[in-house]
Amino acid sequence: MIIVMKQGASDDQLAHVVSLIEKHGLKAHVSRGVERTIIGCIGDEARIEPLPFQAVSGVERVMPVVKPYRMAARETHPQGSVVKVGGGSVPLVEIGSGSLTVMAGPCAVENAPLLDEIASSVKDSGAHLLRGGAFKPRTSPYAFQGLGVDGLKFLREAGDRFGLPVVSEVRNVRQVETCLDYVDMFQVGARNMQNFDLLMEVGRTTKPVLLKRGLASTVEELLMSAEYVMSMGNHGVVLCERGIRTFEKATRFTLDVSAVPILKRLSHLPVIVDPSHAAGQAWLVPFLALAAVAAGADGIIVEVHSRPEDALCDGDQALLPDTFRSLVHDLNSLRSSLPPASYAPWLS
Amino acid sequence: MIIVMKQGASDDQLAHVVSLIEKHGLKAHVSRGVERTIIGCIGDEARIEPLPFQAVSGVERVMPVVKPYRMAARETHPQGSVVKVGGGSVPLVEIGSGSLTVMAGPCAVENAPLLDEIASSVKDSGAHLLRGGAFKPRTSPYAFQGLGVDGLKFLREAGDRFGLPVVSEVRNVRQVETCLDYVDMFQVGARNMQNFDLLMEVGRTTKPVLLKRGLASTVEELLMSAEYVMSMGNHGVVLCERGIRTFEKATRFTLDVSAVPILKRLSHLPVIVDPSHAAGQAWLVPFLALAAVAAGADGIIVEVHSRPEDALCDGDQALLPDTFRSLVHDLNSLRSSLPPASYAPWLS
Amino acid sequence: MIIVMKQGASDDQLAHVVSLIEKHGLKAHVSRGVERTIIGCIGDEARIEPLPFQAVSGVERVMPVVKPYRMAARETHPQGSVVKVGGGSVPLVEIGSGSLTVMAGPCAVENAPLLDEIASSVKDSGAHLLRGGAFKPRTSPYAFQGLGVDGLKFLREAGDRFGLPVVSEVRNVRQVETCLDYVDMFQVGARNMQNFDLLMEVGRTTKPVLLKRGLASTVEELLMSAEYVMSMGNHGVVLCERGIRTFEKATRFTLDVSAVPILKRLSHLPVIVDPSHAAGQAWLVPFLALAAVAAGADGIIVEVHSRPEDALCDGDQALLPDTFRSLVHDLNSLRSSLPPASYAPWLS
Amino acid sequence: MIIVMKQGASDDQLAHVVSLIEKHGLKAHVSRGVERTIIGCIGDEARIEPLPFQAVSGVERVMPVVKPYRMAARETHPQGSVVKVGGGSVPLVEIGSGSLTVMAGPCAVENAPLLDEIASSVKDSGAHLLRGGAFKPRTSPYAFQGLGVDGLKFLREAGDRFGLPVVSEVRNVRQVETCLDYVDMFQVGARNMQNFDLLMEVGRTTKPVLLKRGLASTVEELLMSAEYVMSMGNHGVVLCERGIRTFEKATRFTLDVSAVPILKRLSHLPVIVDPSHAAGQAWLVPFLALAAVAAGADGIIVEVHSRPEDALCDGDQALLPDTFRSLVHDLNSLRSSLPPASYAPWLS
């Protein structure tokens, strides 16, 4: 940590700051510049991180030097980690291993026959995981909230029938235990990215977690949330960029495609992209999916529905099965045209 | 709802949209303009709200006309509602009744003697409620997470001792029952504004709820979250503006002072402001508090600490007791200089 | 235009709004719904667009139906327009014709030998245009402001010597005439996107214009600025996405990759991307360039410098010549893997 | 400036950075921490500010310590500067002297009789300056662009007739000389805040400048733009907060009320607020004006129109003369209730 003193700060003020630093077992390295005096804190920054230096008299600014996340940082695992999903009744899928992972399915599980129809189709088109919401977070209390446990059952059955590990959103701490029996991977949604109790609860399980970036969260905050999960012992975290909130209203959210290479540089965790929620409009989804893979994403998660007009949730953004089939083909073609350093930077 | 057809949409496409509207029991009112045909949907908009018209062929745009919240809307309660907090062992405080409500206390409850010291001081300065976190949502898993139930006990005792109803944050659905025994008012934090299960859980209790605006939530989304609480039967909701996330980094968040009059116009619920979290720096807090009251806020919630340098949480933004005392005086003086229409728009 | 009346608006208020509409030669089509009355305005919306209906008593909301830009709209030119740059002493380059256009060069023209070195290198690597700033807009008055006319001369000479049309930024109305003698294409920078006098001034010339999106401008505003140029007679406008300002600080700006397909759908004008300014860091530039091309961009403009450490401007984000060479190869490889509908949507 | 080296940076990399610093005449103060080595640069930071240290091998991050503006900084003028406007044919108004300055008038000058009517009314209500646009920056080329020089003449005549100094927007460098004959104060609009040539051009005159904050500009960038004007010799700069662009759409822009105290702390220049453009709706303007004054603004600039329905520009947000009259009364009443430290922080 570096502390910048105000112009004209007194020697007493400086001495007080130094004493605070030393009281916590760090050394203070003072540099007197022409306009400002700065203090470098040498030692374990975590011990003084919570101190309110801003509130200390004479201090102008505090600048942390060390990253606040550790287990999620690439330094601790330079080669990039591979997250394994499924196994047993369904194939084992390895996310981050070098090939592209495709997760697809309806926004919400609506009924068993429809889910089977979609699952069969996406499997056939090359999807590796089946997605589908049973507990839907909806802005309005009057909107369809999902089928709950019935939805989970249908999802499990469809996954087993068509050989697809399943991923579904868990919305609160109480649902974690229930979901554990049905899903191969937990999804923590954007609106829960800083629901710290939920992060700790899934962190206590052994199933992998798909962690979506909050719609106004920085990449650093996303990594801190991954750290929450990992700090409880669960290292199977996959990060997901799904669009951030900006002033632009032509899209539902603004896909922050830069977050893909930035996250891969800062962290060893796999990074996937959800182009459906960012776009909010089906025609736009393939463009964003292609951009995501070009930027080095390890996979995508995309909404597919065979009758979008009748969908109970987010029909506007669901791809038709035929469009999805073409998209998977185009993504694989694009991926094979890329130099490896684009998606596996540790190779270069 | 108004549906705008694409330029050159066919008669078949138009007929299909009309049939979708009529299938759900509404009437379609078609206006053929020079460049576009538009369709007005007459009837209960809620029945067609979830339909993915955007995905229907020939449709350019869909524009909702009716507000998606109802119980929270001013139309249902033109005079402004008053939320009552406390009673029994502590005084009854009425928020939204015309006088200014001041909530104050430390960011986190740290220990009983310190809390008593702060509680005694803020009571003496004119505060009406005591705030203090027992379950702290922290960005880092390595930061102080609060004292938990012990914190709630200390808070309850301090409230009773000094005659202050207490408000504390509840972070997940499991904590609601626990907190019920100790607090006079639940706080739902900004990061949980769209934790819909938590909203429903506090909505099933009879204790009032302080609902903070999410840091990237629109005022409409805040009102939808209030609607969640109210839809479960609990109408005691107080809205709280606490700063939104923008590109500006000179403050921790950007206080959206316009949200105060906007919320009061759209809703009958009381509106308070948290200047401490918006500012992130103690010196700035009084300016924002004055601005909030000038804009018509029904109250403020502010962090006070007698030894900010030693605070375990957010010491940078805590006011010293003396500054708080002056601030309360200045706020009351300002409030009495305002015309009533500024804080009670239904009077004009 | 659609006008939504307030719930409970009186018949007199409705009649007044109708009379305002009819006074301007349009017809008013009134639909009385269950909760609201709405008025569709039939006729030339442009005639009533400036009217302050929001200020008229009884009006709740005003919703425009027709897009405010015309010449820039795809409807007026469904096949996508091709913008020609150069010819004469340098090759003629066609932007938007189906192949990828690459513009490259230093941030600022610093001196003739260095510029020649860079120009020679980027030409050799496959660039089609040479970029270089002579009039630099700098946040600080104390920063290097460019070589002015000398810079333009060096740029012209380098372009002629190496067979590259040249593009350079024009910063104010007075410079347009000066630049006209030296450049093949004007650049209007992000900070000048709504410098309407400058737009009109370049609109009066016959040289094509590279129009960068303002850092907080919507895609609609970008198209309105293109309309300014076109309304003066100059239809040679190329749109450029270069990152928008958001809360995220891990990148200098947030590249809005969705803007590429959105702009191509709304407009027939070619769309290119500047990954250098969005990234602000050289290592990130190739990832963003690949994403841009995958999303369907007609070209990219990128900063290249042979000695970034000595650059007088933005050395942090300049690619080394070798990195640029690989990038051009990778971009072409990626482009050839894409289905044509990705970059020429009118074909599908 | 502080330079943070990457974990594992080599001694050679460190030595190279040190040599770069010393080459420019500064001293390098190296602190080897547990995880990172940091280098404090001692000397004139401006000499190394443009160096692309980010691009230098081994460097992780660069943190400037000194503020990039100087003449605009409060350190250079602790007491707060007073900007004088008018004199001669109209009264001399002192902005920043302790009393509240009110600027009012129509968005655009439309014709002489209407302007006189408005000028007479606002003077009578307590306004100190008359505002009115002659050169209007409009998003659409098809919108009313102002009366040009005729507008300036009408404005000058109205100002002289009613004893009000006049302020009007100058949109490009060529208009500066023209405006000089008519206005008492230049306005540089939000969209031109980084039109650096315009800033320098008004900086070469001796008339004061009202500098509006760009809609996505940080307070630091606003101060850098003030620095541009001041660096040319003109120290008569008044800063104006007018709302920033955020995700919230309930208001046209989000008034950043915190910017008032922040700017006054960082700079000695007077700060006023434009509530009209931030609100975009007349009913909201008084609330924002009150908030601005409560936060310590030295004045406000507000749009007033006697027949908003007929206004050629921004009628939605214009106050009626009677509302303006009440507002001025309420603002003065509020101001007199404030402790002086709220608007004159150097007193405390």
Image: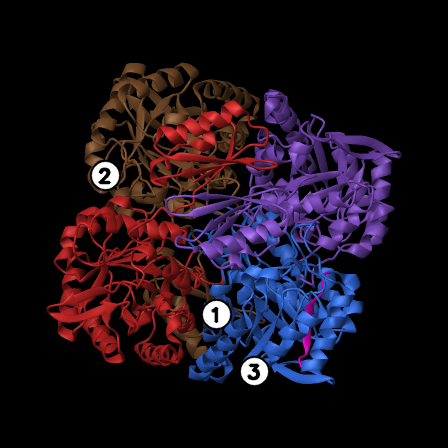
Chain colours: A red, B brown, C blue, D purple
Please indicate, yes or no, whether residue B182 appears anywhere in the rendered image. no
Closest to the observer, A86 or A81: A81
**Magenta stretch?**
C163-171
Residue B176 pos. (x, y %): 22, 36
User: Would residue D126 be counted in the magenta stretch?
Assistant: no
Q: From the viewer's perspective, is A127 left or right of D297?
A: left
What residue did someone put label 1 on? C286
Q: Are discs 3 and 2 located on one and the same chain?
A: no
Residue A348 pos. (x, y %): 39, 70
Give the vertical position of A236 relative to B332 (above or below).
below
State which chain disc 1 sits on: C
Q: Are discs 3 and 1 located on one and the same chain?
A: yes
Residue B159 pos. (x, y %): 29, 20
Closest to the observer, A117 or D343: D343
Closest to the observer, B131 or D220: D220
| Residue type for callout 3 | Gln
